[in-house]
Amino acid sequence: MFKSSPVLLNCLLTCLLFTACEDKKLENNIIVVRPNMVSNSIYKKLDRETDPFDYFASDTTRKSKTTDLFYYNSLTDFGDTTRSRINICTAYIDSGLLRINIGYSYGFGGKGFNIICADDKYSVIPYQTTDQPSKEKTKPTYKIIKQKLILNKSRYMVGDSIFGYVDFKLIEDQKITHIGKGYFRGKIE
């Protein structure tokens, strides 16, 4: 058989280490599908709570809560974790893309993030709106620190229920940190 030399063994281990640590960006944005996530107890908890009042909703009846999710943005939240849990999920299909909006509008603006899904891939795009005109015209860039999206189905149609989990950390323009983690649900509009 083969005799193992310490040099050969070290080379082999070094190669394995570099291979295991290489950047997996291409695999980082693939949607994970878990049909059984609809039975997660978090959704029963959400049934007993109501969404915050939505100033811009055409239907003003209070609905069962759609998120148990933390979203933080270092530009506006300053460590406030209470407001970071006030979110509403809406999902719709637009030009063949599944768009999931998670955030909150408070009358004079809003903040949150969109998850845009195409086939089995997705992108997380944070947003912030205010009633003040914006001077900035450049499109922000995001460095992905981590991201994960789990959905209950691989394809959706209008009227389907969507259940999901998201966990991400992004750095916008090398200065603003966006962190989101938690469960959401909704009906595709």
Image: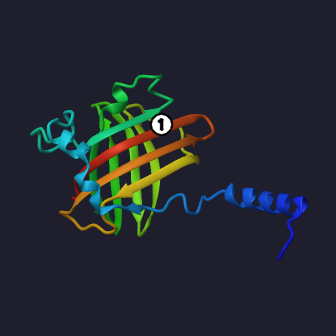
Which quarter of the figure has residue 76? Answer: top left
Instruction: Note whether 131 is above or below 16 in the view shown.
Output: above
Q: Amino acid at mark 1?
A: Ser
The residue under the point 29% across, 55% down is: 37
In the depicted view, which residue is nearer to us: 118 or 44? 44
- Within-10-Å neighbours for mark 1: few <14, some 14–19, many 20+: few
Coordinates of residue 124 in the picture (x, y in percent): 46, 51
Image location (x, y in percent) of residue 160: 20, 63
At x 11%, y 39%, the residue is 60
Quarter of the figure with the C terminus:
bottom left
Residue lying at the far left in this picture: please name it: 61
Residue located beneath label 1 in the image: 134
Say whether residue 127 is left or right of residue 105.
right
Determine the image quadrant of residue 110: top left
SS at circle 1 = loop
Q: Position of residue 127 (x, y in %)?
A: 43, 42
Across and down, in percent, residue 120 comes to: 43, 67
Q: Which scheme is used to colour this image of the protein? A: rainbow
State the residue in front, 148 or 173.
148
